[in-house]
Image (cartoon, helix red, strand yellow):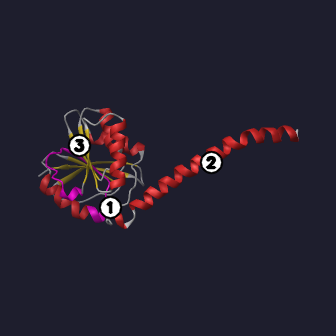
Amino acid sequence: MVEMLRAVLTVLYWPIQLTLAVALIYFSAKCLLIMYTLSPLYRGRLPYVPTRKKSLQEAFSMLEIEDGDRVVDLGCGDGQFLVHGARKTGAKFTGIELNWLLFMISRLKVFARALSGRVTVQRSDYMRVPLSQFNKVFMFNMPSCLKVLVPKLEKELQVGTRVLSVVFPFSSKKFKLLETGGTKTYRLFLYERVN
């Protein structure tokens, strides 16, 4: 019995070791990516926090994105929202990302899924990009950044433009809160520009 158990463990040893090594590499890479985005090279703006897949789908649904819409993701990170949206509709998507590593990951995802005609990723500070051309806005920004960003949204977005903010709400006399969604710890706030 002991010999049989030893033989089984010998056969399973390398597959188990390989699985553990792959898991270690995967999670280490994720940790390094998050640590990199928290570094001073990211200019102190925002940490990279990927949007949860379930929240991504709910956000897409709340924004009511349709063919012909012009959608922007402010701080698109690894491009999850852009790719998800472009696969679901014929809308035009633009991602704006300052971090060069995340920008490259986004571009690679778009290229790998042959979405280059409907998704554009720009390496830029979204505070320097004109937003008047977009009618749907997706963003996951910290409260400190929202204080600076909201006046820009008030100035540039047209009446009727929908804005979805992940986790953090904002207040503005020019935006009306339409609905909230998500979970208790991962809230979604949908606004519309009203005046």
Q: State the residue at coordinates (84%, 37%).
A: 4
C-alpha span from label 3 to label 2: 40 Å
C-alpha span from label 2 to label 1: 35 Å
In the rendered structure, find residue 142 and report the number of the disc placed on it. Answer: 1
Amino acid of disc 3:
Val
Give yes or no for residue 112 being in the magenta stretch: no
- Asked whether the beta carbons under mark 3 and mark 2 sit within 8 Å of each other, the answer is no
Q: State the residue at coordinates (13%, 49%).
A: 132
Number of residues whose C-alpha sits closer than 10 Å to that of mark 3, classed few (under 14), some (14–19) or many (20 or more):
many
Q: Of the residues tagged 2 and 1, which is closer to the observer? A: 2
Amino acid of disc 1:
Met
Residue where numbered disc 3 is placed:
71
SS for tag 1? loop
Q: Earlier in the sequence, mark 3 or mark 2?
A: 2
C-alpha span from label 1 to label 3: 20 Å
SS for tag 3? strand
Number of residues whose C-alpha sits closer than 10 Å to that of mark 1, classed few (under 14), some (14–19) or many (20 or more):
some
Amino acid of disc 2:
Leu
Image spot of residue 10 (x, y percent): 77, 41
Which sits in the foreground, 29 or 178?
29
Residue where numbered disc 2 is placed:
20
- Asked whether the beta carbons under mark 2 and mark 1 sit within 8 Å of each other, the answer is no
Q: Of the residues tagged 3 and 2, which is closer to the observer? A: 2
Q: How many marks?
A: 3
As drawn, 187 above or below 7: below
Q: Which residues are magenta?
A: 125-145
Which sits in the foreground, 82 or 146?
82
SS for tag 2? helix
Give yes or no for residue 142 being in the magenta stretch: yes
Q: State the residue at coordinates (24%, 64%).
A: 147
